[in-house]
Image (cartoon, rainbow, N blue to C red):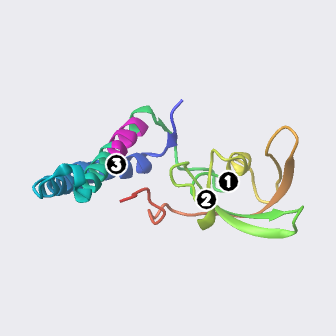
Amino acid sequence: MGTELTKKDIDKIEKEIEYRKLVVRKEAIEAVKEARAQGDLSENFEYYAAKKDKNQNESRIRYLERMVKTARVISDTSKEDEAGLNNTIEVYFEEDDITETYKLVTSVRGNSLKGLISIESPLGRALLGHKVDDKVHIKVDDTYGYDVVIRSIVNTEDDGSDGIRKF
């Protein structure tokens, strides 16, 4: 099974692929040519660095193309009163007596340090489809789980600020 992506995610990935093929690839090939022209390749650090950059770009292109090819397209809409993709959710952790806010996103956008929780993570998967004041049990593994209470759900539009581009 492929990664779950929205149509917007796929569009952004395809834009990155196009950018890498048309701009980054051209720059990388030129850098390799310039470094090769400097002479002896056995001691030419610039040549090896340029080749490494070129190969990393090609690897990233293949990775993104494979991701798009195998992706399972999902809807980014949810019911007004249910936790869903691109919703910002305020969650109360009973065990720690703290409240935190997260935005549910697809796995390629997940970044827990920025409050972006993947819908494929235990927390994200457990919250999907629940409503305000629902008590949700998050199962981490066979021996541990914890409870949270959903305090609020705000339907937030995907503004692209948590985008996928990594160049």
Q: Which residue is mark 2?
A: 87
Real-space CA distance between mark 1 and mark 3, rounded to the nearest whole angstrom? 37 Å
Q: Residue at x 23, y 54 (%)?
A: 43
- Report the disc number at residue 56: 3
Circles 2 and 1, Cβ within 8 Å, touching? The answer is yes
Assess disc 3: are there few (<14), some (14-19) or many (≥20) residues with their C-alpha within 10 Å of its C-alpha. Answer: few
* Left or right, residue 62 beside residue 51: right
Residue lying at 78% horizontally and 69% vertically, measured from the top left: 99
Q: What amino acid type is highlighted by mark number 2?
A: Asn
Q: Quadrant of the C terminus?
A: bottom left
Assess disc 1: are there few (<14), some (14-19) or many (≥20) residues with their C-alpha within 10 Å of its C-alpha.
Answer: many
Residue 71 pos. (x, y %): 46, 36
**In front: mark 1 or mark 3?**
3
- Nearest the viewer among 43 and 82 is 43
Q: CA distance from mark 2 to mark 1?
A: 6 Å
- Image position, residue 94 (x, y; %): 88, 62
- Residue sitting at x 84%, y 37%: 142
The earlier-in-sequence mark between 1 and 3 is 3
Query: Element at badge 1?
Result: loop
Residue assigned mark 1 = 83
Q: Residues within 10 Å of mark 2 (few under 14, many from 20)?
A: many
How far separated are the C-alphas under marks 3 and 2?
34 Å
The answer to which of 39 and 52 lies nearer the viewer is 39
